[in-house]
Amino acid sequence: MVDVRELKIGNYVYLQNSKTPYKITEIGYSEIEYPKYEASGISSEAVFRTYVENLNPIPLTEELLLKCGFEKHKWGVVTYYSPLFELDADFHLKGVDYNIQVKSLHQLQNLYFDLTGQKLEVKL
């Protein structure tokens, strides 16, 4: 399940048990079951409107990072991905005072925007 506080328009998620990525186009309160949240989205195959609790994160993988324009680099035994910020092989964002693990595509999209002010181009 995706935490509604992490969800933003443009994020990619899975719908329930599907492995089809859907792009979020709308988020809001349910008009039927307050205080539930609903989200709408699209894929190449369909559109949806559902409760946020029916959405699942897309796990971050090396293949997905490469599709998002990251480059894989090896330095000794360390593997990391760049260009604008570095994720190590376990998808931890490294910095002087922080160590953040990025587990899913929507988290990466949000972090990328927060750090660069630009949307991450995702090619699924």
Image (spheres, rainbow, N blue to C red):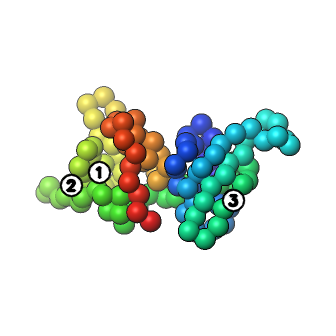
> Which class describes the residues within 10 Å of circle 3: few (<14), some (14-19), or many (20+)?
some
Instruction: Judge by depth and name the residue closer to the eye, 47 or 92.
Output: 47
Residue 70, percent from left and from top:
28, 56
Q: Which mark is residue 48?
A: 3
State the residue position of label 2.
78
Whole-angstrom CA distance, mark 1 to mark 3, is 34 Å
Quick check: 18 above or below 101?
Answer: below
Q: Earlier in the sequence, mark 3 or mark 2?
A: 3
Going 38% across and 49% down the picture, which residue do you hit?
Answer: 120
Q: Given the current orientation, which residue lies at the most extreme left position?
A: 76
Q: Is residue 84 visible?
A: yes
Going 40% across and 63% down the picture, which residue do you hit?
Answer: 123
Q: Are marks 2 and 1 in contact (CB under 8 Å)?
A: yes
Instruction: Judge by depth and name the residue closer to the eye, 38 or 108.
Output: 38
Whole-angstrom CA distance, mark 2 to mark 1, is 7 Å
Residue 90, percent from left and from top:
35, 53
Q: Earlier in the sequence, mark 1 or mark 3?
A: 3
Residue 43, percent from left and from top:
58, 64
Q: Amino acid at mark 2?
A: Val
Whole-angstrom CA distance, mark 3 to mark 2, is 41 Å
Quick check: 78 above or below 84?
Answer: below
Res. 29 image quadrant: top right
Going 40% across and 40% down the picture, which residue do you hit?
Answer: 113
Residue 66, percent from left and from top:
32, 62
Left or right of 98 in this view: 20: right
State the residue position of label 1.
88
Left or right of 114 in this view: 48: right
> Which class describes the residues within 10 Å of circle 1: few (<14), some (14-19), or many (20+)?
some
